[in-house]
Amino acid sequence: MIKTIGIFLIAAVILWIEVPPLLEKKYKKELLVFLIFLAIGVGLSITLFGFEKSIPNPFDLLTFIFKPLNDFISLLLK
């Protein structure tokens, strides 16, 4: 629980530092992208450190998708 609160506090500090200049310059799209990436980062950090769960590697998904395709092409070329 302490780790989760710490992650939220760090995210709040990042927001406090980064958002006012974006609003001042009227960078609405950049602010939206920044908030989306920050939310993803906070969510992954809470999952990894707060709940101590492992996060799957994105390469595993690519291997799952392309391994059968690779095997099929190998069969065709033999």
Image (cartoon, grey):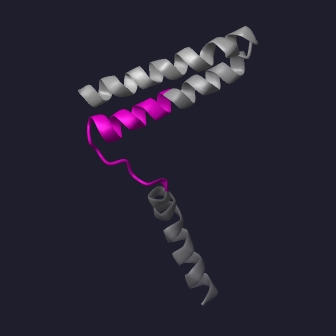
Identity of the residue drawn at 76% across and 12% down: 25
Identity of the residue drawn at 41% across and 37% down: 44
Is residue 67 depicted above or below 52 in this figure?
below
* 45 within the magenta span: yes
The foreground one among 38 and 77 is 38
Is residue 32 depicted above or below 78 in this figure?
above
Identity of the residue drawn at 38% across and 28% down: 7
- Give how far across and how far down residue 16 sits, in percent: 54, 15
Assign the N terminus to one quadrant of the image.
Answer: top left
Which residue reaches farthest bottom? 78
Which quadrant of the view contains residue 33?
Answer: top right
Is residue 25 depicted above or below 49 in this figure?
above
Assign the C terminus to one quadrant of the image.
Answer: bottom right
Is residue 5 depicted above or below 61 in this figure?
above
* 41 within the magenta span: yes
The foreground one among 56 and 74 is 56
Which quadrant of the view contains residue 18?
Answer: top right
Instruction: Considering the whole magenta stretch, tell me its main secondary structure.
Output: helix
Q: Is residue 45 left or right of residue 39?
A: left
Identity of the residue drawn at 53% across and 18% down: 15
How many numbered marks have been drawn onto this rendered protein structure? 0
The foreground one among 55 and 73 is 55
- Give how far across and how far down residue 9 sits, in percent: 40, 21
Question: Which segment is the magenta one?
Answer: 39-58
Which residue reaches farthest left? 1
- Give how far across and how far down residue 14 sits, in percent: 52, 23
Which residue reaches farthest right? 25
- Give how far across and how far down residue 17 sits, in percent: 58, 18
The foreground one among 69 and 63 is 63
